[in-house]
Amino acid sequence: MFKEQVTSLLEGALKETPSLFLIDFTITPDFKINIVLDGDNGVTLKDCVAVSRAIDHNLDREEQDFSVEVASAGASSPLVLPRQYAKNIGRKLEVKTIEGRNFEGQLTAATEETITLEWKAREQKPVGKGKVTVQKKEEILFSDIKEAKVVLKF
């Protein structure tokens, strides 16, 4: 019953701001509500406060004592939804596949089923000595991705 109430309030709050979407939602046995959000344009403190209030102000603490924590997905958090990839087109990603292959390249496309990474690599010349720079491209199915993270530059 409590989880259904919270879920309904959370869904209502997310409908208020369609650019926001849910990454994770849990309720611990001691009724600590944890919500992790992301957004097509990022997540602001104001967004987190609005979602927190939508839940906090519509539940009765006399019926059930609880706490609410709303956070944005961190910059170093793995990408989990196709919608997150779409907002990161143009950024450099590090992708690990289920088969154990690793890729690092610029995300150039994202559909509902796949992502496309592109990067430059140094390879042996086909004829003669030395190396040549070649453009590489890999299309990866979401179902094959074990973990993907944005590579941060400082």
Image: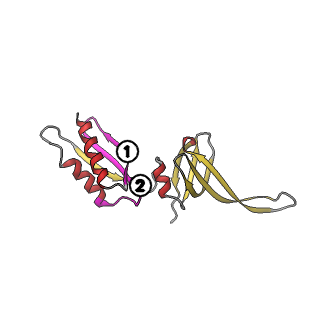
State the image coordinates of residue 44 (x, y, percent, origin top left). 33, 61
User: Would residue 132 be found to the left or right of residue 54 on screen?
Assistant: right
Quadrant of the image occupied by residue 59: top left
- From this viewpoint, which residue is outermost toward the bottom? 154
Q: Give the residue number, with chain letter if any, for mark 1.
A: 24
Q: Which is closer to the viewer, label 2 or label 1?
A: 1
Question: What numbered label is drawn on residue 54?
Answer: none
Q: Determine the residue positioned at 37% across, 56% down.
A: 19
Residues packed near mark 1 inside 10 Å, few (<14), some (14 to 19) or many (20 plus) = some
Looking at the rendered structure, the secondary structure element under dot 2 is loop
**Residue 99 shows up from this direction:** yes
60 w.r.t. 138: above or below:
above
**Residue 30 shows up from this direction:** no
Q: Determine the residue positioned at 34% across, 43% down.
A: 25
State the image coordinates of residue 153 (x, y, percent, origin top left). 52, 64
Residue 86 colored in magenta in the image? no
User: Would residue 47 be found to the left or right of residue 73 on screen?
Assistant: left
Q: Give the residue number, with chain letter if any, for mark 2.
A: 74
Visual colour scheme: secondary structure
